[in-house]
Image (cartoon, rainbow, N blue to C red):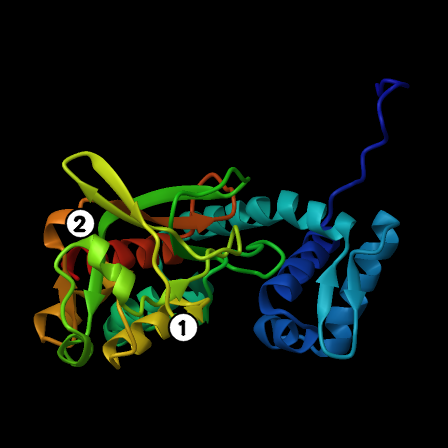
Amino acid sequence: MTNDHESPRMPTDGRLLGNLSVLVSVVETGNFARAADALGLSPSGVSRAIGRLETRLGVRLLQRTTRSVHLTDEGERLVAQVGPLLSGIEDAALSASGDAQAVRGRMRVSLDPMFSRLVVAPKLAGFLAAHPQLEIEIVTRDELGDLITEGIDVAVRFGVPESSSLVARKLLDTRVLTVAAPSYLAAHGAPRTPKDLAGHACIQFRDPVTRRPFEWEFHRRGKITTIDTTGPILVTDSATMYGLCVAGAGVAQVLEVSVRDALEDGRLVELFPDYAEEMFPLYAFYPTRRHAPPKVRAFVDFCVALARKA
């Protein structure tokens, strides 16, 4: 017997689950055409499925334009709730078929630009060769963004994570180094101590959170010294900063995991090795769910292995 004070429950059937899957696919792929291709449907079939779902729920889930689709507030809440559940259903089905550990399907990853270019890109072909049923789309940027609305399966970023509903897994810590190219040092001389940077062109990097240039810190024997630095160049992505530094445009503070090859082959020279005790973490982020899919776990393990070898 149903309690008169309880809210009526919406019956769950195959069509409802199917329409929810279509919605999640639209969010993951970014538009109706790509969702249709991924699901083996026509774009009009995808549109009808979304329309049926909106009619059944009595709310608009997507804002449509000629070029893109965006979730409404109601749509964001729905996807945040059902996305992990649908993933769990998929994992359960794979487990029942004895294929729970299969690394396959399409995965969208968001990476720090320099980590992507210098650490991941040189080894990605080997990772895909080991997992021939996997397809990867890489988005590079410094900001984490909204993984759910953008359909990101996993993101890898440097820095301490802010509080959020995302799962954050710390992968490792890497040192912060001060470096310059031999050509820059030949033209301007090598600073002997951090205080000598006052007379050098220091490439400034804008903090994506505060929107201000990062302060330059130097850690030695537990003591932190902050140095005011200046320079004619301010950048917003780490890959550009790296390119400028290698080209001799100035001194930069970088993460060791991303520049080890450049240090080994002489493209960059480490300055002040006695002041390089500052550590910076590398994290993997993915939407909250009980178990990350095998493709996500495999990619995160791949990033950890690369970073430790770099």
Q: CA distance from mark 2 to mark 1?
A: 24 Å
Residue 60 image point, x, y percent: 84, 56
Q: Are marks 2 and 1 in contact (CB under 8 Å)?
A: no
Residue 34 image point, x, y percent: 62, 76
Q: Which residue does the numbered mark 1 point to in the structure image?
A: 232
Q: Residue at x 64, y 43 (%)?
A: 81
Which amino acid type is marked by label 1?
Pro
Secondary element under disc 1, as helix, strand or loop, is loop
The number of discs equals 2
Q: Characterize the local packing of mark 2: few (<14), some (14-19) or many (20 or more) Cα atoms within 10 angstroms.
A: some
Between residue 102 and residue 150, name the one nearer to us.
150
Between residue 193 and residue 126, name the one nearer to us.
193
> Residue 299 occupies which quadrant of the picture?
bottom left
Question: Which quarter of the figure is the C terminus placed in?
Answer: bottom left
Secondary element under disc 2, as helix, strand or loop, is loop
Question: Which quarter of the figure is the N terminus placed in?
Answer: top right
Q: Residue at x 79, y 40 (%)?
A: 11
Please report whichever mark, 2 or 1, sits nearer to the chain's N-terminal start. Answer: 1
Residue 48 image point, x, y percent: 80, 68
* In this picture, residue 186 sits left or right of residue 233: left
> Residue 147 occupies which quadrant of the picture?
bottom right
Q: Which residue does the numbered mark 2 point to in the structure image?
A: 276
